[in-house]
Image: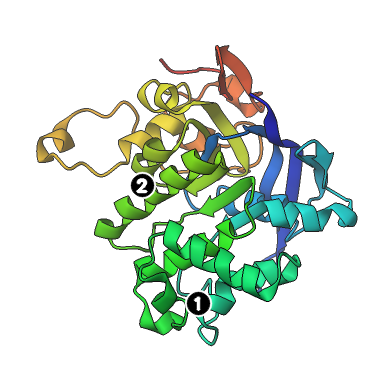
Amino acid sequence: MEEILSVQNLTKYFTNKGIFSSSKIVKAVDGISFSLKKGEVLVLAGESGSGKTTISRLILRAIEPDSGTIFFDGVEVTKESRNLDKLRKQCQIIYQDPYAAINPRMKVSDIVMEPLQIHKIGTTLERKKIVLDVLHEVRLEPAETIYEKYPHMLSGGQRQRIVLARALVTKPKVIIADEPVSMLDVSVRAEILELMREIQEKHGISYIYITHDLSTARYLGQRIAIMYLGKIVELGPINDVLFHPRHPYTQALIDAISEPNPDNLYQDKKIRINEPIDIDVYEGCRFRSRCPYAIEKCKDEPPLDQVEKDRLAACFVKIN
């Protein structure tokens, strides 16, 4: 399958300037490499602070990388400003908060039509038809009535559909979905995820699905990259990774999933995360202070090596 997006050795550091302490370097994204195939759903999973959202901002050039390269549809977009319009037209984003993601003073028609105006797509009448068509597609009915409404007149689920419609209106090749259902009611989440999957299959859109929820990740994703403190620690087909993890942090994430069956609470967990110790978190394996399998060699940084076909893991121990 042909690649639509390729990220190579992407790096972004921030300086955290403390008021009462010395400044610290935060390695938000540290030498990340991955690819996204056409029509594929790649999940970026990990706890808060692992660098997932920073990667999305780097891909869209909302912030500039310190180093590394990004290729979109065979064209490098890391430094070339002339390719940004094409990138932002064909690579859209769905934000986490449907309330903050749209302007409350704009009508739905203006919100969804804005990308068409920015990229000079169609005439006024053509734009209205495109907007109504995409409102129908995201199941906002009656579309003609929704078209004239303001965001405060809509529910959270409807607002997220508006955000999805705005992302779809330019017919993108890639959509980055940053925790798109985490702020919605449980009853609405399944509807939005099913809608996203139907749209992805219909149009062949590639998704980067960012989440910390492994259950929704498995529902939508095909491959998964597990991130921890700016590094990918495991990468592979989603069922292989989640059912047979090869990195202790992946197993720790799985063990942390809420248990719907109370009897499961008393089962032994394969890994219990230890309390961190006072070490330089960026020295050697970043998970070693919390890992029950840590050995002396973990003071060196483990490479992201192939452990099986289509499977990569950054661990000297590599659990089974």
Q: Secondary structure at mark 1?
A: helix
**Circle 2 crowding by C-alpha within 10 Å: few under 14, some 14–19, many from 20:** few
Where in the figure is residue 103, as x and y percent of width and height? 55, 80
Which of these two is toward me, 145 or 180? 145
Q: Is residue 238 above or below residue 91?
A: above
| Image x and y of residue 113, in percent | 61, 72
| Image quadrant occupied by the C terminus | top left
Give me the residue at 24% from left, 58% from top.
187
Mark yes or no: residue 96 visible.
Answer: no
**Amino acid tagged 1:** Val
Q: Check disc 2 and report the residue beneath it.
A: 194
Q: Amino acid at mark 2?
A: Glu
Q: Residue at x 47, y 76 (%)?
A: 147
Residue 240 seen anywhere in this rendered image of the structure: yes
Instruction: Say whether marks 1 and 2 touch (CB < 8 Å).
Output: no
**63 vs 294, nearest the viewer:** 63
**Residue 144 x, y percent position in the rendering:** 43, 75
Q: Is 177 positioned to the left or the right of 5 in the image? A: left
Mark 2 element type: helix
Task: Tell me if mark 1 has few (under 14), some (14-19) or many (20+) residues whose alpha carbon lies within 10 angstroms of its own.
Answer: many
Tell me if residue 142 comes above or below residue 291 in the rendering. below
Residue that label 1 marks: 108
How far is disc 1 from disc 2 in space, using C-alphas? 22 Å
Query: Which callout, 1 or 2, points to the residue nearer the camera?
Result: 1
**Horizontal relation, residue 154 to residue 278: left or right:** left
